[in-house]
Amino acid sequence: MAQDMTQHRPGRAIALKLCAVFLFMVMAAIIKSVSSEVPPGEAVFFRSLFAIPIIAIWLAQRGQLREGLIPSNLMGHVWRGVFGTSAMGLTFAGLGLLPLPEVTAIGYATPMFAVIFAALFLGERIRLIRLSAVALGLIGVMIVIAPRLSIGADEMSRAATFGAILVLIASVLRALVQIHVRRLVQTDHTAAIVFYFSVTATCLALLSAPIGWVVDHPAFVWVWPERSVVLLLITAGLIGGVAQIMVTSSYRFGGASMLAPFDYASMIFASLIGYVAFNEVPTGPILLGSALVISGGILIIWRERQLGLDRSKSKPNQTPPGTP
């Protein structure tokens, strides 16, 4: 398998990573703004379809288009697509029911679940420090979602509870994606993993359209959106493609363990965008829970660096925590 040429340029690496995190938050805000107009499956379709040309052009410029178009483990990409597309769809559904900062905070549970799944499926040993970090992170997630677990009598409270559950399930699925990608990089080039996720996500999202013919529910019935909504969906796809390229490129200039903590800048961006665009202000439980989850995540990053666990191969194919 071909390997990317890398350079140690930490300033450029951090700048690319922060730009990618910001763009993913902008993309999430756009999806949230049209969530009342289109179902999640249709939003996933637009987001994935219009990322494909951006990624293809980027791969062509790097001379990796051949590697991106010829996968070695086709079914591996299909399963990565199933898990990743499901996570994206559930996150998009949650964005329509919860504030952007809350969706972001719940998404921080992904690294915690990834550690657990690494022990279950990859045979990694979890010692006291990482086990404590996972426990701290999961406590933080419970603090974030606890206000949603008291199901109120009104429909809005029930919808918010449902949204929190959807985003939490999405976090579990994204953790499974991380474990799957760690295996996939052993047979396939990074270019193929990046490219075929957009392709499989587009196809799988398109398959959600017939569900609306059977299930007459707004969450499944595809619609013909207004021109302004179509433009927003196309913009979300293009931004998602650019952000994916940026986060992948950032790992050419800096190590995974150095860049991983900058994923948590997403809470800053989510809070700012949520306040400006949707008049959303993070609550006390969200801030407290996020602080605990971020502390646990950073502790995991530090410990894995100490143990010399190599995450650099799989990180470029992930999105920042809490982002679709």
Image (tube, grey):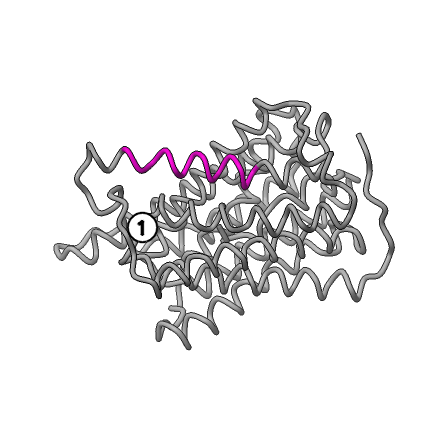
Q: What amino acid does circle 1 point to? A: Gly
Residue 32 as seen in the image, left or right of residue 312: left
- How far from the left and from the top, in percent, is residue 205? 40, 39
- How far from the left and from the top, in percent, is residue 194? 63, 41
4 relative to 100, above or below: above
Magenta part mainly helix, strand or loop? Answer: helix
- How far from the left and from the top, in percent, is residue 199? 53, 37
In the image, the segment drawn in magenta is 197-210
Residue at horizontal 66%, vertical 27%?
71
Q: Where is mark 1, residue-wise?
A: 163
Residue 185 as seen in the image, left or right of residue 11: left
**Residue 103 lies in quadrant:** bottom left
Residue at horizontal 47%, vertical 43%?
171
The N terminus lies in which quarter of the figure?
top right
Count of numbered circles in the view = 1
Residue 293 as seen in the image, left or right of residue 32: right
